[in-house]
Amino acid sequence: MSALFFEGILLGLTLVTFFGFGPAFFALVQTSIHRGFGPAALLAIGIFLNDVVMVVLCLMGAVQIVTAPSNYLWFGISSGVILIIFGLVTYTRKVSSPSESADDEVDLPVQMKGPSWFTYIAKGFFMNIVNPFVWIFWVGVVVGISARMGGDETRLTTFFSGTLITVLLGDLLKAYGAYSIKRFFTSRMIGLLNKIAGIGLIIFGLFLIGRVIFEYSF
């Protein structure tokens, strides 16, 4: 394994550990508990594909269209509104399960019919793409690493391959962790998780709107 690939892994571990608890994290955990590990894995793949696209766009310079001051305000506000809508839907979601035992244990709907595989991938991709802070983060990382490596495409590809693969594995681990402990959840606990996840998404949305307005104004 090359040193550059290992450095990329270290960056990926940093992202998973310290920056991996945004809206996509809530969606991953909730999907894993409600639908099972498979759908959550597809969601993680969607997030991974979005990260790949972002890195490529940053390297190509196309991301300037989104982060331009004239576009940043409206992009940030619309993204915040979308996250708030996601949060409201999640908060008000009713817990349903095919059967419940007398002690209120939930037979979680892993086997229940749900959205198609493409829907989960698209949701993961969309959850990441509406967050302009993710774009700004990747711009900063890509610019810094590109300058350090003199724009060498081979070295950049090796480095970011390590980063992105690590982030994907980290998301899969989070999804599997939620899937592994779901049998301990009752319907009330899942309802509470929905409300916590919903509130979290709403807070992210409000924070996003407030921050972009503040940054644009000053």
Image (tube, rainbow, N blue to C red):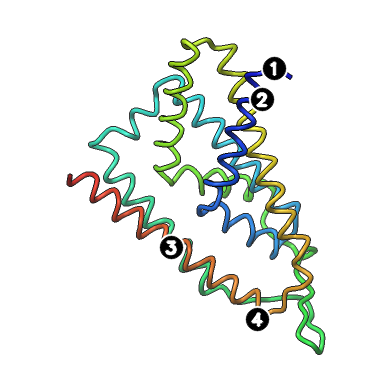
Q: Which residue is mark 3?
A: 85
- Identify residue for label 1: 2
Given this view, does label 2 or label 3 mark the residue nearer the observer? 2
- Nearest to the eye among marks 1 and 4: give it: 1
The residue lying at 60 percent from left, 22 percent from top is 159
Q: Quadrant of the N terminus?
A: top right
Identify the residue under disc 4. Answer: 188
Q: Label 4, secondary structure: give it.
A: helix
User: Contact (CB < 8 A) between labels 1 and 2?
Assistant: yes
Q: How far apart are the alpha carbons under marks 4 and 3?
A: 23 Å
Amino acid carrying mark 4 in the image: Arg
Q: Earlier in the sequence, mark 2 or mark 3?
A: 2
The percent position of residue 217, horizontal first and vertical second, equals: 17, 47
Going from the N terminus, do you reach mark 1 or mark 4 first?
1
Q: Nearer the viewer, mark 1 or mark 3?
A: 1
Badge 4: how crowded within 10 Å, few (<14), some, or many (20+)? few
Q: CA distance from mark 2 to mark 4?
A: 43 Å
- Label 1, label 3: how far apart the Cα atoms are: 44 Å
Q: Nearer the viewer, residue 7 or 155?
A: 7
Q: Residue furthest bottom?
A: 102
Taking the spot 47% from the left edge, 16% from the top edge, the residue there is 148
Between tags 2 and 4, which lies in front?
A: 2
